[in-house]
Image: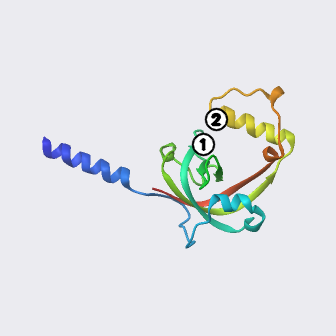
Amino acid sequence: MAKHLIFFILLLSIIFAKEIELGQKLTLDSTTAVSTLLENPDTYLDKPVQITGTVVDVCAHKGCWIEVSSDRPYETITVKVDDGVIVFPVTAKGKTVVAEGKLEKLNLSDEQAIRIKKHEAEEKGEDFDEANCKLTEKDKTVYRLRGLGAVIK
């Protein structure tokens, strides 16, 4: 019985320690700091980049995006994929990710920005008051990584 328990514990540790590869295989040799991307986004637009950071949030609905921490406190970037192409597991939250993709810029109308804020609030189970929503330019200009591949460690 003790041998079976030890085997089971070892098996679980191997399973949970394994890296998870999602999407296309990573091809770039170096990473770009998230802070560098967000400081100089026009330099990186539509170009392949690789980032690394901690997964701070995951789309609980379809696994179609992750929020990745920057090298600067309180700064993040979203890695977005097409629904079903890559499905980020909710268990990725708190783990390190290396992700590749192309930086994209979204210029949103007021209506689009409000719809995104409302959708994000719904996904997080938070209340959203559209009447009191005040938008900034930052709310209407979004930089995110269009994800092609990732490794969760």
Residue tagged 2 = 123
Q: In this orientation, does residue 27 appear?
A: yes
Q: Is mark 1 on a helix, strand or loop?
A: loop
Position of the C terminus by quadrant: bottom left
Q: Which amino acid does label 2 sit on?
A: Glu
Residue tagged 1 = 59
Q: How many marks?
A: 2
Residue 115's x, y, as percent? 78, 37
Decide if residue 86 is on the left or right side of residue 137: left
Residue 121's x, y, as percent? 68, 33
Label placed on residue 69: none
Q: Which amino acid does label 1 sit on?
A: Cys
The residue lying at 58 percent from left, 43 percent from top is 57
Q: Circles 1 and 2: CB distance less than 8 Å? A: yes
The residue lying at 83 percent from left, 26 percent from top is 131
Q: Residues within 10 Å of mark 2 (few under 14, many from 20)?
A: few
Q: How is the image coloured?
A: rainbow
Residue 153, above or below 120: below
Query: Residue 135: which quarter of the image?
Result: top right
Front one among 120 and 134 = 134
Q: How far apart are marks 1 and 2 (CA)?
A: 7 Å
Residue 81's x, y, as percent? 64, 53
Position of the N terminus by quadrant: top left
Q: Is mark 2 on a helix, strand or loop?
A: helix
Q: Earlier in the sequence, mark 1 or mark 2?
A: 1
Residue 8's x, y, as percent? 24, 46
Decide if residue 29 is on the left or right side of residue 74: left
Decide if residue 46 is on the left or right side of residue 18: right
